[in-house]
Image (cartoon, coloured by chain):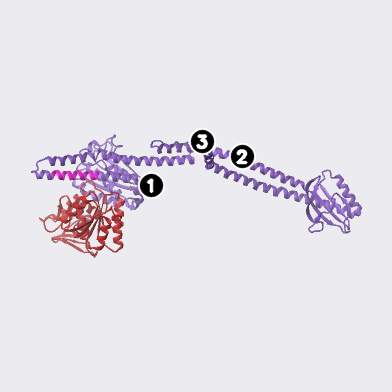
Chain colours: A purple, B red
Amino acid sequence: MPAPFTRQRVMLVLRSAGLRFALLFAALFLLAGLAFSAVLWWGTAGALDRQTAAAIRADTTALMERWRDGGRPALIEAIEARLAADIEDQTLYLLLDREGTRLAGNLETPPAQADTDPAWFNITLAREGEPSEARLFRLDLPSGSRLFVGRDVAEKQRLRALLTDALALSAAAAAFFAGLGAWLLRRALSQRLAPATLTAAAIASGDLAPRVPLSGRGDEFDRMGETMNTMLDRIATLMEGVRGVSDAIAHDLRTPIARARAKLEEALSGSPADSAALRSAIEQGIADLDGVTRVFQAVLRIAEVEAGARRAAFSSLDLSPLLEDAADLYLPSAEARQISLETEIAPGLVMRGDRDLLLQAVANLLDNAVKFTPEGGSIRLVARRGARAIWVDIADAGPGLSEADLPRAGTRFFRADSARTMPGSGLGLSLVRAVAVLHRGELHLAEARPGEDPPGLRATLRLPA
Amino acid sequence: MRMLLVEDDVEVARFVKKGLMEAGHAVEHAPNGRDGLFMAASEPFDLLVLDRMLPGGVDGVRLVETLRSQGNKTPVLFLTAMTAVDERVRGLKAGGDDYLTKPFAFAELLARCEALGRRPASDAPATRLKVADLELDLLSRTVTRAGKKVDVQPREFRLLEHLMRHAGQVVTRTMLLEKVWDYHFDPQTNVIDVHVSRLRQKLDKGHDRPLIHTVRNAGYMIRAEP
């Protein structure tokens, strides 16, 4: 069906932003041309008018001289001499006596406005069949005769015609260039937008991997592409979070649930007389389920934090008392294991954030530190304000992490081999990392005392102030 | 205490009602928000235990908002399956007094119910708290046992104050964390236990009768009788 297709194409072209831009520019071109012509018209036509008036005035003065010197015959003679000398047929004269009889000149009849004021007026006259315009000056001589001196101003009309033609031509040119511009602009726009459109289409069809290629020009299109890519990265992160939760449910919750189930089943099949064993099995089962719930909540909490929605609830807070509270909370636990917990917290560390989450993050770090530091060791909590961020540094005297484990720490359910025997879910650092990112900061892990044995772990939180 | 439980899950409702009644409370049950609102508005209760999501067009938050707008100040404990932290804030903002996430240990629910239901009717501050021979002076912030001063740190003082205000009631670890430290978070290890046992050592040193008791699978309780 070619007809609707063509109509569709026409509609498409008409709706194009490129066409609208081009039309706008064409209109602007035309307006500018009009304004330019108007200025030109007023400038040149005005000059011509002034020039004509001066010529007429000079001519009249000269004729008056002749009249004063030789009277009417001399005037008539002068007029006839001038008419004879005027090859271009530009000048107009008419001399009338008191009764209105024509004495000399090339105007056949006295002009209609002859008796009206003012002395300057315009007339139209037919010259060689063509209507033409002339400017006349009337002078009443003392004898009662009247002298009309004039100039043909067809020149001005020619100028007007020229300008009108020029304007029409420029309008045509503007229309042409507008059309060309619309086409070029439309093509350029669709060419520059094509990568973004193709990427979006690919993503809509289910492949999240492609990103908008950038031209490297750093222009509006590149900026749009960059914004789109940032958005896509964010969506990919969120998708990964969701996938992480499902993976977690698949792997790490299955084990404890299976364990609890096995224990309960075993208790059920055991001797019914042994109520103590039954009771202990049930208690173990409940403890296992509580463990499952805790892991579940931690996973959901991490997902919630990673989704970033809690940023809306941020408020201004002072990190210093919060860190004091965290240290205070863990001090007895540390002391119970003869670990010294030293703090060096700068006052007034004001920032925007989520109080409970920040405490949770610091608590998780302190918890790890207390857990992994051997008896008699020491932990240092240092917080200070840097140029643009607050730095919270927790260094322990534990075994630290191996080179290979450092980058992997903080991914969900990662547990270093040395930590396998310790209680924990492998989610603590994930949450710390998620909280840091939520606050647009980061978690950095390094050796606390490089070269020593054990090297210890230094966890540094950078939180933008 | 006379309590109203508004909960649509039959099994949870049966379990909670049975437990609360065994603990010596009178419990009425409404299976949906509309019945719950009707009962709460027409009969006097000491405590409402509300599920956050309820069938029947009136959910927990709406129910509380309606009651509060009528000037009803009965304490409200929310139960919810939603874990998002904002949910807790929303529930408390609507007029709820406490919040508990499903699944919960019954001991935690009971402790919170009793803490809410037996809150002092007036907010007139007591200046001295007393349990057996242990005295706590809120003005001079001193603790004495059998007339002898016990040195406690400020945090331990607040911990003890909270336990003594709820003397004879179970106080769970999470309740202590929320009320004494004022943070809502999940400590990975037994930090609270260490604090309590340190306080207990200070109080019981030189005395043969312990005052702070550990309640198995629940929390702590301060009481005079052993």
Are dots 1 and 2 on a single chain?
yes
> Mark 3 Cα within 10 Å, few/some/many (few <14, many 20+)?
few
Q: Are marks 1 and 2 in contact (CB under 8 Å)?
A: no
Q: Which residue is mark 1?
A: A388
> Which is in the foreground here, disc 1 or disc 2?
2
Give the SS element for disc 1: loop
Give the SS element for disc 2: helix
The span from disc 1 to disc 3 (Cα, nearest Å) is 65 Å
Tell me the tag on residue A176. Answer: 2
> Mark 1 Cα within 10 Å, few/some/many (few <14, many 20+)?
few
What is the chain identity of the residue bearing mark 2? Answer: A
- Mark 1 / mark 2, whichever is N-terminal: 2
Q: Which residue is mark 3?
A: A1
- Specify whether A305 is left or right of A256: right
Are dots 1 and 3 on a single chain?
yes
Q: In the image, residue A84 lies at what x, y percent?
A: 87, 45
Up the image or down, B41 lies above or below A10; here it is: below
What is the chain identity of the residue bearing mark 1? Answer: A
| Amino acid carrying mark 1 in the image | Arg
* Magenta-tinted stretch: A280-295
- Mark 1 / mark 3, whichever is N-terminal: 3
- Mark 2 / mark 3, whichever is N-terminal: 3
Q: In the image, residue A86 lies at what x, y percent?
A: 84, 45
> Which is in the foreground here, disc 2 or disc 3?
3
What is the chain identity of the residue bearing mark 3? Answer: A
